[in-house]
Amino acid sequence: MAWWGTLLGGTLGYMFGGPLGALLGAALGRNFDHGVKLNYRQGEFDPGQQERVQAAFFTATFSVMGQVAKSDGKVTQDEIAATESIMSRMQLDSGQRKAAIRLFNQGKETGFPLDAVLAQFRQECHRRRSLVQMFLEIQIATAMADGKLHAAERDLLYHIGGQLGFDRNSIEQLLHLAGQPGAATQRGLPLAEAYAMLGMDSKASDAEVKKAYRRLMNQHHPDKLIAKGLPQEMIQIATEKTQQIKAAWEQIKSARGLN
């Protein structure tokens, strides 16, 4: 929660500007829109900028969730429940929870600067693709919270993914993976769903499936995501994802008789 304390202490507030700063400032009743731009050094953030990335992730996640939730014309109870579920899993304190709700509501408003928010978020993450992918997966989960994906929601997710540097095939794969049952960590996961969880076909070789498993584990490993700027509060979400990937791999290993 270090980034939150730094934010409230005023240090991050001075540096955090742009549309994300304006959104976060409005959520907290403060003016952050006078911040300065990032200075990059050899492709990385200057020392101490990880807290800024965490604040950007938090701000973009909940505000864009509001935009996704209302994209089909109305915000359903399932979508509200999905947002509240993420808040609960993050174990937000009362101040963070209030800010998250206000960000979500800002995202629902007409005139929400989606493209500007996504552009700044992508800049703040600075080539940390696995972190951006986690953000996109959360938006997909919000859209699919009611058990179906409306055309308007799909189009918006294509747009969001495209703005963040994902091609249509990559977005389709993430949509397909999100459509697998959430009980993937339980025994008895159907083999076809286990392969789908790894983005593989049952005809793939042992080496190909193992490579896909290792790649997904590397992308979703909680420690690596935290090091790249995922807010500490979201570690449970990343952990659940790795558990699903491991369960799918164990199912496939068992079916193939692999050690």
Image (tube, rainbow, N blue to C red):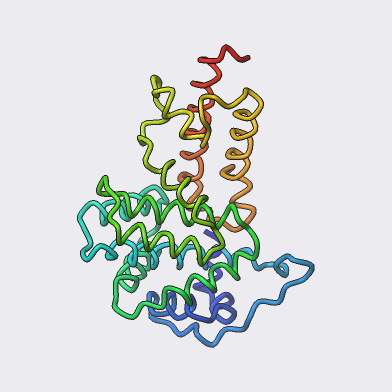
- Which residue does the image show at 45% across and 51% down from the upper left? 137
In what quadrant of the picture does the C terminus appear? top right
**Image location (x, y in percent) of residue 147:** 26, 45
Relative height, residue 244 to residue 128 (above, below): above
- Who is closer to the viewer here, 85 or 91? 85
- Which residue does the image show at 45% across and 81% down from the upper left? 22
- Who is closer to the viewer here, 124 or 148? 148
Quadrant in the rendering for residue 53: bottom right
Relative height, residue 259 to residue 71 (above, below): above
Q: Is residue 131 left or right of residue 136?
A: right
- Which residue does the image show at 22% across and 66% down from the upper left? 73
- Who is closer to the viewer here, 235 or 7? 235
Q: Is residue 81 left or right of residue 214?
A: left
Residue at the extreme front = 203
Residue at the extreme right = 42
- Which residue does the image show at 38% across and 75% down from the upper left? 27
**Image location (x, y in percent) of residue 115:** 46, 74
Q: Is residue 248 left or right of residue 222?
A: left
**Image location (x, y in percent) of residue 54:** 55, 62
Residue at the extreme top = 257
Quadrant in the rendering for residue 84: bottom left
Q: Is residue 90 left or right of residue 206?
A: left
Relative height, residue 87 to residue 223 (above, below): below
Relative height, residue 97 to residue 118 (above, below): above
**Image location (x, y in percent) of residue 214:** 63, 34
Number of callouts:
0
